[in-house]
Amino acid sequence: FHARLTSDAGNPDLYGKEVFAFAGIGRPEKFKETLIAAGAVIEGWGSFADHCAYLEEDLGELVAAADAKKAIIVTTAKDHVRLPPGLKDRVQTFGVHITWDETHEPPVLAELIRQTLAQNGYNV
């Protein structure tokens, strides 16, 4: 199966803008690549463990550096929900979704999932 991350339509316009970004997902570099593809100028980057439970001190340096440059701070939707309340308004969300490279792949994937669930005793 071949797919890529595609920017959500409601994302902030980052083209040519200085951005400080971070992600705590399985492959954080993929998020960074998505931001670059959207035209963001990455001035600072933070990579955290998947499912990181953020504390304000975890992002202190990144936020201070972004403030000094008057840059935008962005993260994934998955990471944004785990931010401390004091940072949620300061950090923008840049959402992505999966786009399949082949039009036949989603039905094939759905069938593979259905078969796997059935083999493991789930009623599908």
Image: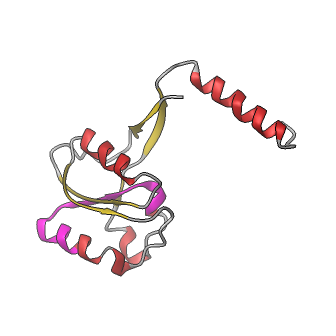
In the image, taking residue 118 as reference, residue 13 lies left or right, namely left
Q: Which quadrant of the view contains residue 93?
A: bottom left
Which residue is found at the position 48% from the left and 64% from the top? 81
Which residue is found at the position 53% from the left and 19% from the top? 103
- The C terminus - image quarter: top right
105 or 56, which lies in front?
105
Which residue is found at the position 41% from the left and 55% from the top? 76
Residue 52 location, x and y as percent? Answer: 47, 68
37 in magenta: no
Residue occupying the far left of the picture: 69
In the image, taking residue 124 as reference, residue 93 lies left or right, namely left
Which residue is found at the position 24% from the left and 44% from the top? 36
50 or 62, which lies in front?
50
Vertical comparison of 88 with 119: above or below: below
**Which segment did they paint magenta?**
64-79
Q: Which quadrant of the view contains residue 60?
A: bottom left
- The N terminus - image quarter: top right
Vertical comparison of 17 with 65: above or below: above
